[in-house]
Image (spheres, rainbow, N blue to C red):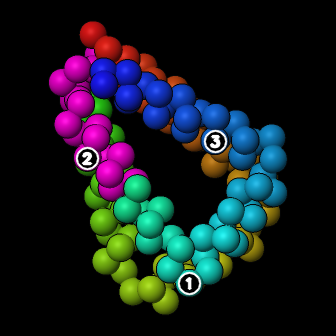
Amino acid sequence: MTHVIWIIGALICVCGLGAVLKPEWVKRFAAFAAVGNRWRPLAAVKIVVGVVFLILATSSRSPEAVIAIGILMAGGSILALTLKPEKMQAVMHWWQQQPLWLYRLWGVLAVLAGALVIYVGWPK
């Protein structure tokens, strides 16, 4: 269980790299998630990951950083779930209209965030 945090960080890096190399995939995924309420289970998964970070923080290199990341993950998704569905639909459709370079930029930021999660989540 002590390796779960850095493995999630590695998955974040891989997804970010995918966004950098193939931003069209992210655009298609955003279109898929925008249909109906498909974004709700995705937010629920992010809440679960945030809670896992909170539970496993003590086994990491930097528990304070892992706790902060877990709170941000879970809190942001809880906030998304409390918004009106129409508002989230508008946000999802806005994302679909963005140029590919913005998807690449978010991919670079995801790679950096994933690297940070790997670093702080590495077991003691």
Disc tally is: 3
Point 31% across, 77% down: residue: 82
For residue 77, what is the image quadrant? bottom left
If you read the primary sequence from the N terminus, does the residue marked by circle 1 or circle 3 appear first?
3
| Residue 121 vertical position relative to residue 24 in the rendered view, above or below | above
Residue 100: image location, x then y, percent: 80, 57
| Residue toward you, 36 or 9 | 36
Residue tagged by mark 3?
15
Point 70% across, 36% down: residue: 17
If you read the primary sequence from the N terminus, does the residue marked by circle 2 or circle 3 appear first?
3
The Cα atoms of the two marked residues, 1 and 2, are separated by: 26 Å
Residue type for callout 2: Val
Residue 20: image location, x then y, percent: 75, 42
Q: Could you say whether the residue bearing mark 1 is in a helix, strand or loop? A: loop
The residues colored magenta run 46-64
Q: Which mark is drawn over residue 36?
A: 1
The Cα atoms of the two marked residues, 1 and 3, are separated by: 24 Å
Point 72% across, 46% down: residue: 19
